[in-house]
Image: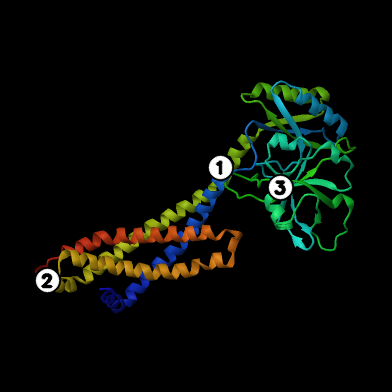
Amino acid sequence: MLRHLFTLIWNRKRANLLLISEVFFSFVVLFGVSAVLITTAKNYLAPHGFDYEQVWRLEVRAGQGLEMPRAELDDVLRQVKALPGVQTVALTSGNMPFIFNTNNSIFRYKGKESPTTNVYDADDHYAAAMQLQLREGRWFAPTDDGSNHRPVVISQDLRESLFGDAPALGKVFTYGVPGAEIKPENEFLVTGVVENVRMSSDFNAAEPAVWLRLLPYDTTHWETANVLVRVAPGQGGELQEKIARTVAGVTRQWTTEVRVMNDDRLSKRRYTLVPVVGLSIMGLFLIVNVALGLFGVLWYNISQRRAEIGLRRAMGATGASISRQFLGEMLVVTTLGVLGGVLLAVQFPLLGAFDLPAQRYLLAIAAATVAVYVITALCAWQPSRLAAAIQPAMALREE
């Protein structure tokens, strides 16, 4: 039976080559869409590595042309922390989670170079405010004040890229610029390792991260201070007004903006979801067009092969066998197109393209294969029924 199907396909090789090409390109597009959707879904379901609930983002700005002394800023933070409903206050850098502000670099340790790494400034209270999950070591503490190197905490993925399976605590690494002068402030001492974090958006994968300790009681003058405020459950606008008034009570020249981190997350989610939705719509549009094209081609094939069908029916073939023949031909043609697509798709995990795990590519190949077979089977079902219903006398008379 299979040999007979191949013979029929070869006899109509020009028309079937067009079908195979259509199936091939459909598979490739569906493979790409599936890879993106699977990656997005897995990222969305992965843990963030920190707790963004009940965290507010406080931005304090000095007046135009002014700077805020660190001692005065620390006094403001103490007053904010003393407010009822505030649990923890932490000073950090401007690249806070879920906003369009990044700061990244590359680091080096004994010839090993890290991937692009997010760099955050953090004080001793940052871990409590964000509820980071420690895997090794500890967070910053006053005992680090006398350190000869700048204390840092790194994420697990950065630890693996720099140190592999070797111990990381107590190791010193530097910026990854070859030939750059190594200064004491650019030598980083690992004091702790935390779980991987996803601070970009709900749909982005975890990225390597390092937190550099902000030295307390330094003489730096700040133009803008970024503060994380963890509040008790149920707090809202009233506490936000109290925080703004507390900051304004220090000096009227300072301005304050309070944002809820979860609102930032939802806003970033809507922005990053747009390309995913657009790609899904493109995939759906492709599926509809492929289905219509296949349906039309099969319908045309039946009209061109009515004499063949009538002859087979006259020789005793049943309607069910005619239907199976057309379904079988279409599935064989689909298999040839899918095999070409699979040969192309398996190059992605073999070459490590886009730094995605091989498992996601394999899932995308499986999803695209199933989708193509389902589409072609559905499109071939109705035309094959029409072929089975052709009566031999009618077909031969028309011929």
**Is 188 left or right of 127, judged from the image as shown?**
right
Residue 307 on image: x %, y %: 17, 73
Q: In this view, does 300 lie above or below 34?
A: below
The amino acid type found where label 3 is placed reads Thr
Which tag, 2 or 3, sits closer to the chain's start? Answer: 3
For discs 2 and 1, the disc positioned in front in the rendered view: 2
Q: Callout 1: helix, strand or loop?
A: helix
* Residue labelled with disc 1: 270
The amino acid type found where label 2 is placed reads Gly
* Residue labelled with disc 3: 102
Q: Within the image, what quadrant is residue 98 found in?
A: top right
Q: Residue at x 41, y 61 (%)?
A: 369
Residue 203 seen in this snapshot: yes
Which tag, 2 or 1, sits closer to the chain's start? Answer: 1
Query: Is the N terminus in the top left, top right, bottom left or bottom right quadrant?
Result: bottom left
Disc 3 crowd rating (10 Å Cα; few below 14, some 14-19, many 20+) is: some
Of 288 and 234, nearer the camera is 234
Residue 316 is labelled as 2
Say whether marks 1 and 3 touch (CB < 8 Å): no
Residue 231 on image: x %, y %: 68, 27
